[in-house]
Image (spheres, rainbow, N blue to C red):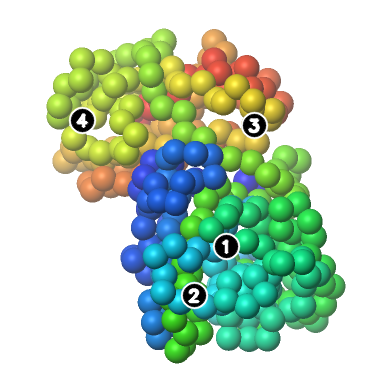
């Protein structure tokens, strides 16, 4: 597996992808309109004196190379004065800042890279006449590689155009690797307000044979349950909507209604809304469940997909006694071991298996 993170905040929940909060003032909002239209995106605002508003994804192990993609909107809406600032931090294993990416919202409106935090000297970028407009979505891609403390590579692409290409030492700490990504708003002390909206985040390492390079444009789409699948073995709890699939189909997941079972191997599968008609390719499928343990003993959940006659179940995940998000992803179709075809996604079923 090489796709480590996919997140569009389409569930309307800040913790959708399983993350560490850097500052809880970040919110998931339908304002501004997300890149895909409708749904939700991450909205982060910074107040005067350089307070930050961000979330942090911590990786299981340190990396020396990665690619990421993120939709970014530098915002002025509702702000009395807008500063330059960063929206992305690359942290080393001790949370030192190796690299930051920002936008000069108050000056030339270029996207920028700093080796270190937003307080450090910006790396010169290929200028875009007039810069990149505020209150508009832009596609930003970053490629970072640290061969050692002396050599490395940094590439920044904006809307498909490479604007920074540096082969040099790109580490700003004593580490030659990274282990966390921060998304939100970071600004220097004493500056006024800055705000970014963020959507359609994807993060790849460079191992394996799929999703191991530049990601390109794309969207994170939520396919919600809309009909019963081939198996309906769980009971209903909370408000009874009359069908298992409708217990788990709300746009913003909650525990107001749910499915439940204390029987190992019990399974529910659901048919899903179709992907957009203009879908060309699918890089990965993530199954997300908001779940909790309500037994006195331990319990686990196996997230499950079915693209053929045989379901494919991810490794069981131990449940917490408080509601938490659980996710598993498939980069290839388990029926074919090849890339997902849009038709296979249209016919896909997804659900859970009790363990």
Q: Which element is circle 2 on?
A: loop
> Which residue appears at 76% of the width and 52% of the height?
160
* Foreground disc of the pair 2, 3: 2
Q: Residues within 10 Å of mark 4 (few under 14, many from 20)?
A: some
Residue toward you, 250 or 338: 250
Residue name at image x 78 percent, y 70 percent: 127
Residue furthest toward the right? 167
What is the x, y in percent for residue 263?
26, 23
> Dot 4: what SS?
strand
Rounded to the nearest whole Å, what is the CA distance between mark 2 and mark 3?
37 Å
| Residue at the (34%, 66%) spot, across then down | 25
In the picture, measured across the screen, residue 40 lies left or right of residue 133, that is left
Residue 57 place in picture, x, y as percent: 49, 60
State how far apart marks 2 and 1 are (Cα). 10 Å
Label 1, secondary structure: give it. Answer: loop
Q: In this image, 139 relative to 228: left or right?
A: right
The residue pinned by badge 2 equals: 82
Other-residue count near label 2 (Cα within 10 Å), few / some / many at <14 / 14–19 / ≥20: many
| Circle 1 residues within 10 Å: few <14, some 14–19, many ≥20 | some
Across and down, in percent, residue 13 comes to 35, 48
Residue visible at 54% across and 15% down in the picture: 347
Label drawn at residue 134: 1
Helix, strand or loop at label 3? It is loop
Find residue 110 and report its image quarter: bottom right
Distance between the alpha carbons at the discs numbered 4 and 2: 43 Å
Residue 323 position (above or below residue 234) = below
Please report whichever mark, 4 or 1, sits nearer to the chain's N-terminal start: 1
**Mark 3 sits on what residue?**
282
Q: Quadrant of the C terminus?
A: top left
Q: Nearer the viewer, mark 1 or mark 3?
A: 1
Q: Is any part of residue 66 visible from this angle? A: no
Query: How far apart are the alpha carbons under marks 4 and 1?
Result: 41 Å
């Amino acid at each position: 597996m090489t796709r480590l993170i996919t997140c569009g905040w389409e569930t309307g929940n800040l913790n959708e992808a399983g993350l560490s909060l850097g500052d809880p003032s970040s919110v998931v909002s339908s304002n501004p309109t997300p890149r895909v239209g409708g749904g939700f995106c991450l909205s982060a605002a910074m107040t005067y004196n350089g307070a930050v508003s961000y979330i942090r994804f911590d990786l299981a192990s340190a990396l020396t190379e990665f690619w990421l993609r993120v939709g970014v909107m530098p915002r002025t809406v509702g702000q009395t004065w807008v500063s330059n600032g960063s929206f992305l931090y690359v942290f080393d294993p001790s949370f030192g800042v190796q690299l930051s990416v920002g936008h000069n919202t108050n000056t030339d409106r270029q996207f920028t890279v700093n080796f270190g935090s937003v307080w450090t000297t910006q790396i010169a970028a290929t200028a875009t006449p007039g810069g990149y407009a505020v209150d508009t979505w832009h596609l930003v891609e970053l490629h970072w590689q640290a061969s050692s403390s002396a050599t490395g590579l940094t590439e920044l692409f904006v809307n498909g155009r490479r604007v920074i290409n540096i082969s040099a030492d790109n580490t700003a700490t004593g580490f030659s690797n990274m282990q966390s990504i921060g998304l939100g708003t970071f600004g220097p002390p004493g500056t006024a307000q800055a705000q970014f909206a963020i959507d359609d985040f994807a993060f790849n390492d460079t191992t394996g044979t799929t999703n191991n390079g530049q990601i390109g444009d794309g969207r994170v789409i939520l396919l919600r349950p809309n009909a019963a699948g081939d198996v309906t073995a769980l009971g209903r709890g909370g408000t009874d909507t009359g069908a298992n699939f409708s217990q788990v189909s709300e746009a913003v997941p909650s525990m107001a209604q749910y499915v439940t079972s204390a029987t190992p191997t019990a399974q529910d599968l659901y048919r899903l809304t179709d992907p957009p008609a203009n879908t060309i390719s699918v890089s990965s499928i993530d199954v997300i469940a908001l779940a909790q343990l309500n037994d006195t003993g331990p319990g686990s959940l196996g997230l499950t997909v079915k693209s053929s006659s045989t379901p494919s179940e991810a490794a069981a995940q131990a449940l917490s006694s408080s509601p938490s998000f659980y996710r598993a992803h498939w980069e290839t179709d388990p029926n074919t071991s090849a890339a997902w075809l849009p038709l296979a996604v249209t016919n896909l079923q997804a659900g859970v298996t009790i363990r």
